[in-house]
Amino acid sequence: MLDENLPTFYLRPSSDNVKYHASVLLSQYGSEAVPAYSLRHPDPASPGSRNRYAVALYDSYNPDILYGEVLLVPEWTQSSLSQEEIRRNGGVPPAPQPILPSTFIIQLYNPDQQIVVQQGVSKWSATPQWVFEMPQQSFRQPSVSSIDRTQSDPTVSETTPKLRFKWKKDGKLSKDYVCSLSGKNTNPDGSKTKNREPDITLSILKHLKEVTMYEPNLSRVDMEDPKGLEVVMLMSAIVIREVYNGNIRETFNVADIPRRLSGGTAPRKNSYERTRRQHTDLQPSQAPPQPSNPQPPLQVQTANPRPPPTDLRSQWEIDAETARLKKQVDREERERRHAEHAETKRVKKMLEEEERRARQKQLEIDKETERLKRKLEIEQKQAQRNNAPSLPARPATNLQPNFTGLHYPQPPVQRPHSANPYPPASPYLQGPPHNASSSVFFGGGPNLRPPEGRRVGLKPSFFGLSGHSHQSGQRLAKKQSAVF
């Protein structure tokens, strides 16, 4: 602060916690700084604020009062047509770079007038300077004449005298800027400038943070609109601070140059996979209900929030984005084809593996079947060998004497024979003759049957030499000697 008695304006962050807003505080005679103006910038995220700089000065207590604003659109470099540069940039010409403009316009309201600020270089110190002019008369004189009412305002009239002001750096190594009123020429004809009055210092921009007004010198300025001069000095100081002493890309809200389109870009999520997953996850029960009487959709026309391109940078961004999207679509298509090929290859390999396992399993089944068949044949042969009938053993003859009498053991029951298997040895040992009256031709002979309940027995032999005993089914036992 040069002097606490002088009116000093400070730039501070806004109380509404908006980054692109600021407050201009005023302090004089050592008093506490109070809000005097409100400084507003457009939202950097808004498409309309791209590639340009804008600032407006409002009243701090009444936000509807606008004192002035500045809109600054930079110039752009021409894109290189070199094929090497285009190839390095991924098939797109290099991005146009902003050129710092040498002129900006301050638009004042009530009364409306435009103040053109022109950048130049000082002849003596070779330091930059900004020159602007303001009319001495800004308001129309009151008159009852209709002719006076049809005349143009004094601010745009070429006959209205103007005062010349300039901002210049207070030295090559200094960060301070001084605004002064150029001295008047004392020569009547204006041919020589050596009789010009010295410059009058009106304000100083200290360290690009505060603006101090030299109030005693302001009274020496012959102008009808001192408030307009104050607004112009404040806004020109803010533009010099932010545009000509700041980062040009941040000042003009230039979008960052996207990474090379030929590579290094982060791939977006594959829309093909996402769509396929959505169709797979959507069950029939989860499908949205269809209205019974479908109506055609309404044609809603949405306004494009982005204005049409008015500069080379915006057009280049559109072209670069188009090329990037085209490359991205091509890359996604290649990835989709690659994924389909990989999926087909995986399914084919899986099917081949299943077929191989099925063949191997069938071979194992056939091998096990053959083994079980051989085992079953062996077991059947062993069972047949074990279950085969054996010849009955011949009964042993009892050679011991039996004093109690003859004993005829019971032989096993056998099927009765139709005829005597043992023919008689002599005619004397034959059985009783057949009935004479019986005849083979008349129904006798072998067809004769004994009556029911009566069993025909064989007559025992006289000498006991017959093959059958008197008991049917018993074998003749050897007679034992009574002496021995």
Image: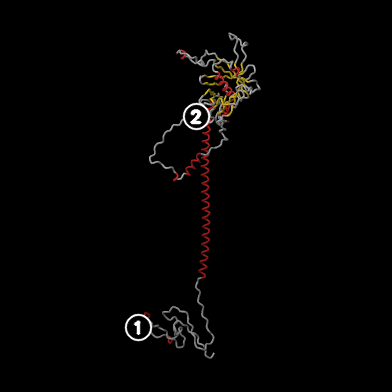
Whether the residues at callouts 1 and 2 have beta carbons within 8 Å, the answer is: no
Please state, as top left, top right, bottom left or bottom right, where the C terminus lies in the image: bottom right
Q: Which residue is mark 2?
A: 306
Residue type (three-letter) at the residue carrying disc 1: Ser
Q: Position of residue 271 (x, y in %)?
A: 50, 39
240 relative to 158, above or below = below
Q: Position of residue 22 (x, y in %)?
A: 56, 28
For the residues carrying marks 1 and 2, which lies nearer the camera in this image? 2
On the rendered structure, is 440 left or right of 141? Answer: left
407 relative to 85, above or below = below
107 relative to 327, above or below = above
Q: CA distance from mark 1 to mark 2?
A: 142 Å
Which residue occupies the extreme top position in the image? Answer: 189
* Helix, strand or loop status at disc 2: loop
Residue type (three-letter) at the residue carrying disc 2: Arg
Q: Position of residue 49 (x, y in %)?
A: 53, 28
* Residue drawn 52% across the image and 81% down it: 396
Q: Position of residue 318 (x, y in %)?
A: 52, 29
* Residue drawn 60% across the image and 20% down it: 213
Q: Looking at this view, is 80 or 132 the one in front?
A: 132
Q: Which residue is mark 1?
A: 438
